[in-house]
Image (spheres, rainbow, N blue to C red):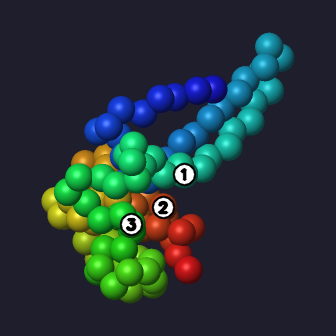
Amino acid sequence: ISWTPSSSQTGSKYVKVEAVDSKGGKTSQSFYITVSAAGGTVAGSSDNSCDVNGDGSITSEDIRMIVEGRGSDNLNLDVNGDGAVTLLDSRACAIQMQ
């Protein structure tokens, strides 16, 4: 599997890979990857998109803010960049929490 992200695909991305064999057996694995822009910074965003309150670290407060913002159009809370604030955003950040 390979993927070369474009400059518009930065942020935390949810990936699910499923493999099926010729006998009908299957398995899957899900994970998040974080895509950074070339040069290490993303124009118009912080270095850490999960730090939604801007205090310099990812904490339960950031996760709470994302969960409470579900369904909103607040792009600061849409850390996976899919255009919607959902539990996937909070999940992506929870695995990065210090």
For the C terminus, the image quarter is bottom right
Residue 20 point in image, percent of width and height: 73, 23
Query: What separation in Å lies between label 3 and label 1 (alpha carbons)?
Result: 15 Å
Q: Which secondary structure, mark 1?
A: strand
Residue 38 point in image, percent of width and height: 39, 43
Amino acid type, label 1? Tyr
Residue 52 point in image, percent of width and height: 31, 74
Q: Which mark is residue 32?
A: 1
Seen at 38% across and 86% down, the residue is 61
For the N terminus, the image quarter is top right
| Marks 1,2: beta carbons within 8 A | yes
What residue did someone put label 2 on? 92
Chain-order first, disc 3 or disc 2: 3
Amino acid type, label 3? Asn
Q: Which mark is residue 48?
A: 3
- Residue 62 picture quarter: bottom left
Seen at 36% across and 32% down, the residue is 6
Seen at 39% across and 66% down, the residue is 48
Chain-order first, disc 3 or disc 1: 1
Seen at 23% across and 52% down, the residue is 43
Callout in the foreground (3, 1): 3
Q: Can residue 92 be spotted in the picture?
A: yes
| Marks 3,1: beta carbons within 8 A | no
Given the current orientation, which residue lies at the most extreme top position? 22
76 left or right, relative to 5: left
Q: Which secondary structure, mark 2?
A: helix
